[in-house]
Amino acid sequence: MEAATKRLGYLPAPVARLATSPQLLDGFLKISAIFESTTLDPLAREVVIMTMATRNGCHVCVAMHTAKLTALGADAGLIASLRDPDAGPLSDERLEAVRRFTLDVIATSGAVDDDTLRRFLAHGHTPQNALEVVLGIGAYTMSTLANRMTGAPLDEQLAPFAWEE
């Protein structure tokens, strides 16, 4: 909790609620840090996270990662499309391949067929990136489900990025 407070300048309510299980909080902080160190570029990682957040209906994660995308200078159209799972394909084909692959991995419980993997790789991604998507799915399944289970509120710092399903 101290690290999150130091990094963000405040203790996010979701972090405090996850701390009810120190093991869950520790696991999430470690796995999300590992995900941040993958060879997926920052926007591709955020696509995985936002895909998980909207799919699982985690308003906290959507707001937090909308703020992160904004800080990264992501295109407003990309952010809007990621926040609306019914918006259709992303305009950036490379990032759309990440979004689609994330959804396919979830839908098949990881048993993606060769064509699905080839489509992902055709956009410049690697077999390592495919496994890194699985890592991101794991990390953000953990946080989205825990945030929903604990009823994690949106901190006022994230109010400008609020989201509803």
Image: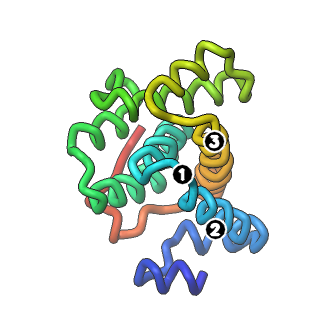
Q: Earlier in the sequence, mark 2 or mark 1?
A: 2
Residue 76: image tag: none
Seen as rendered, the residue at the extreme left is: 76
Q: Residue at x 56, y 32 (%)?
A: 102
Asked if 147 appears above or below 10 in the picture, the reply is: above
Look at discs 2 and 1 and give the one toward the viewer: 1
The picture places residue 125, in percent across and down from the top left corner, at: 51, 35
Please state which of residues 64 and 97 is positioned toward the viewer in this rendering.
97
Dot 2 and dot 1 residues touching (CB under 8 Å): no
Q: Which residue is mark 3?
A: 128
Q: CA distance from mark 2 to mark 3?
A: 22 Å
The picture places residue 112, in percent across and down from the top left corner, at: 68, 21
The picture places residue 68, in percent across and down from the top left corner, at: 36, 59
Given the image, on which type of amino acid does mark 1 rest? Thr
Given the image, on which type of amino acid does mark 3 rest? Gln
Image quarter for residue 81? top left
Dot 1 and dot 3 residues touching (CB under 8 Å): yes
Q: How is the image coloured?
A: rainbow
Q: Which residue is mark 2?
A: 29
Q: Earlier in the sequence, mark 2 or mark 3?
A: 2
Q: Please state if 32 lies on the left or on the right of 159 as rendered.
A: right
Q: Residue at x 34, y 70 (%)?
A: 156
Image quarter for residue 129? top right
Q: Which residue is mark 1?
A: 39
Q: Please state if 161 lies on the left or on the right of 29 as rendered.
A: left
Helix, strand or loop at label 1? It is loop
Given the image, on which type of amino acid does mark 2 rest? Leu
